Image: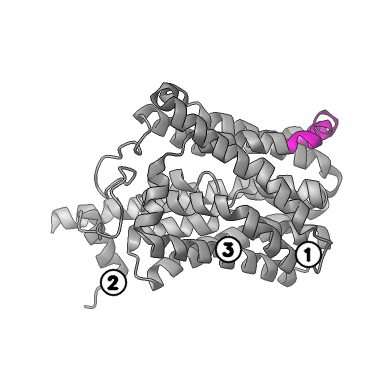
Amino acid sequence: MQKDPEETEDREDAAGAADTSAAPDTGRNAPPGAASPAPAGRPPGADRAARRAVTVFPVLVLAAGAAGMAAPGAFTAWAADMPYLLGVVMFCMGLTMTPLDFRGVLRRPWAVGLGLVAHYVIMPGTGWLIAHALGLSPQLAAGVILVGCAPSGTASNVVTYLARGDVALSVSVATVSTVLAPLVTPPLTLLLAGEYLPVDASAMVTDILKTVLLPVLGGLAVRLVLGRHLERLLGVLPWLSALTVSAIVAVVVAGSSTAIRSAAALVLLAVVLHNGLGLALGYGAGKLARLGTPSSRAMAFEVGMQNSGLAASLATAHFSPLAALPAAVFSVWHNVSGAVVAAWMSYRDRRAKGAVAGA
């Protein structure tokens, strides 16, 4: 009987025979079958808090969306503050970064480069195809495409960790995709969404620099200066980020509450297709490049999970609150789907490990 090649590879990974030569020893990887240590530079408490935040995050966002629908007047005045809210999220991201994140890029340029190309080709391209296939209105089409042109999501690293994927690769791709966002996101949005709505790419570059790159670099600088003095605060950062993104979602939903009832089902379908294709094609890209199962899992989440907070902020500032609706829905869905897929991948590892132990 012919064996399933992927099942055989999963069994090898679960037995500890995965290809680790390609993965940098940053301390961020959780070896398959081993107890999951905290990533390098983070105390165990911070890692547990991150996992809890990812689990609870969809609930918080749903509650925020419901509040925005129920009392839109309480949140619409916050629309002007969305760039500052996003800046808080990105500053928190910078505080969690260390030089190890950048060293991983230098040690694995091929894998990181592949992840970046896959991310910035697959998600913008599938967003454009979905917008055409579903016949979305110009505002919604531009919103879906903008989500696809955003950098990797801030929760992708933790979800990769829960899936027993290559966390070092995930961190490297997420870091570089965020740093490159001012150079990549605006021209891609202009190219793909320009047929639907006018796109001021230069103004978008300025906004991303102010709300993404500068806060990230500021957080990194504070982390480098204060070092271990911040470690006790790292466990709070995932919760602060989750609450801030929830506030962004509440503002977006409040701004488009009158249109949500008629467009919600179509937007949800677009988001599910977008995220699902990103996860599947990202994983497939890793497999085609023979990166191995752990790295392919990292690719899946780095491609399929987006910085929807940035997309919502940019859509509100440059298009309309309705155009930000796909990003708000994506904020909920990609965390739900990511957690489910990660749990399934982890289950496969445990099953394969049990089969190897019983052989």
Q: Decide: is 289 above or below 268.
A: below
Amino acid type at image mark 2? Pro
Q: Residue at x 47, y 54 (%)?
A: 173
Residue at (45, 46) in percent of width and height: 157
Magenta-drawn segment: 68-82
Q: Would you say 150 lies left or right of 156 here?
A: right
Select label 3 or label 2 by which is in front: 3
Q: CA distance from mark 1 to mark 3?
A: 22 Å
Q: CA distance from mark 2 to mark 1?
A: 40 Å
Q: Which residue is mark 3?
A: 120
User: What residue does disc 2 label?
Assistant: 5
Q: Secondary structure at mark 2?
A: helix
Q: Does the segment drawn in magenta span residue 249?
A: no
**Quadrant (top left/top right/bottom left/bottom right) for the C terminus:** bottom left
Residue 316 locus on image (x, y percent): 78, 46
**Mark 3 or mark 2, earlier in chain:** 2
